[in-house]
Image (tube, helix red, strand yellow):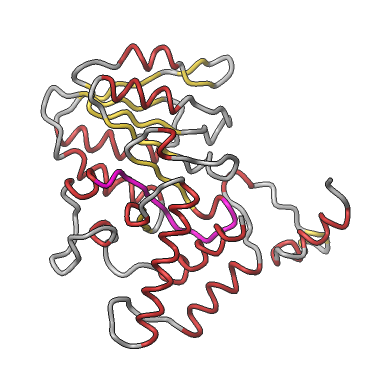
Amino acid sequence: MLTLEFVQSLRQQFPALARRQNDQPAVYLDGPAGTQVPRRVIDAIADYLSHRNANHGGLFATSRESDAMLDEAHRAFADLLGADDPDCVYFGPNMTTLTFALSRAVATTWRPGDEIIVTRLDHDANVTPWVLAARDAEVEVRFAEIHREDCTLDVDHLRSLLNERTRLVAVGAASNSSGSINPIREIASWAHAVGAWMFVDAVHYAPHALIDVAEIGCDFLACSAYKFFGPHVGVMWGRRELLESLPAYKLRPAPNELPGRWMTGTQSHETIAGAAEAVNYL
């Protein structure tokens, strides 16, 4: 039962709610763009920077503690996404950057005459990376349309676009503009029936529903921690056989093993620590 006492105790967990604007309590109305963070997430970030800030892979204490923190973050997000392999989860600055990198790798499997499907409903972060990759690979882009009367995806139109030339279907689990939810499980099964891969943008879905990548049956899924009380960190999951076989764009000293082969450069360890704490908070 939602009581006044419960609401007050909840508000006290979020320092941003103590802000005043023009001598009035601040009201945050941009919730769809991102959430405020609870004190425990802020504390996790500060604790990492204060006590164990280091590059990973070293033999000294703070480096080993950084490794342990990263391992825990992979496990936390694997749990959140219903994945059984933490090494198939990796992090980056944001979903857009991660999708651009993945699109380049996936595009190496395409050939002229192939097709991909994106939608008119999706956030551009799940459209332009694929469109640009298709342009460079000389692959045709097919757009699934929307029902303009209610801003839902025209699922029948999407299904009609699928054929033996389709190599990828990129669909959002939920629309950032309308909130409409797409039948991603069914779409994934249709994609696989013609031999295509399924990429799911779950950025706007993850704050509102449980995710199970095995149940969805997708090949890749992305989300962002700042949508559910975390800092600005992008998260990607992919099927192991694909993440191991696709050519990751990485530096020569970077590991060939998962998840490191997809995590370019030095990661923002402090925000990953905060993101893991956001999962614990949930």
Residue range highlighted in magenta? 228-240
Q: Quadrant of residue 278?
A: bottom right
Q: Residue furthest front?
A: 84
Check if residue 234 falls in the magenta segment: yes
Residue occupying the point 39% across, 76% down: 66
- How many labels were placed on the picture? 0
Q: Residue furthest right?
A: 4
Locate residue 121, reporting x and y percent: 46, 27
Q: Is residue 83 left or right of residue 151?
A: left
Vertical placement of residue 156 versus 25, above or below:
above
Q: Quadrant of residue 255?
A: bottom left
Q: Quadrant of residue 15?
A: bottom right
Which quarter of the figure is the N terminus placed in? top right
Residue occupying the point 44% across, 34% down: 215
Vertical placement of residue 156 versus 248, above or below:
above
Locate residue 199, reporting x and y percent: 35, 36
Which quarter of the figure is the C terminus placed in? bottom right
Locate residue 253, reporting x and y percent: 15, 69
Residue occupying the point 48% across, 24% down: 183
Check if residue 157 falls in the magenta segment: no
Locate residue 63, reporting x and y percent: 35, 81
Closer to the camera, 181 or 176? 181
Q: Is residue 144 left or right of residue 45?
A: left
Residue occupying the point 45% across, 36% down: 123
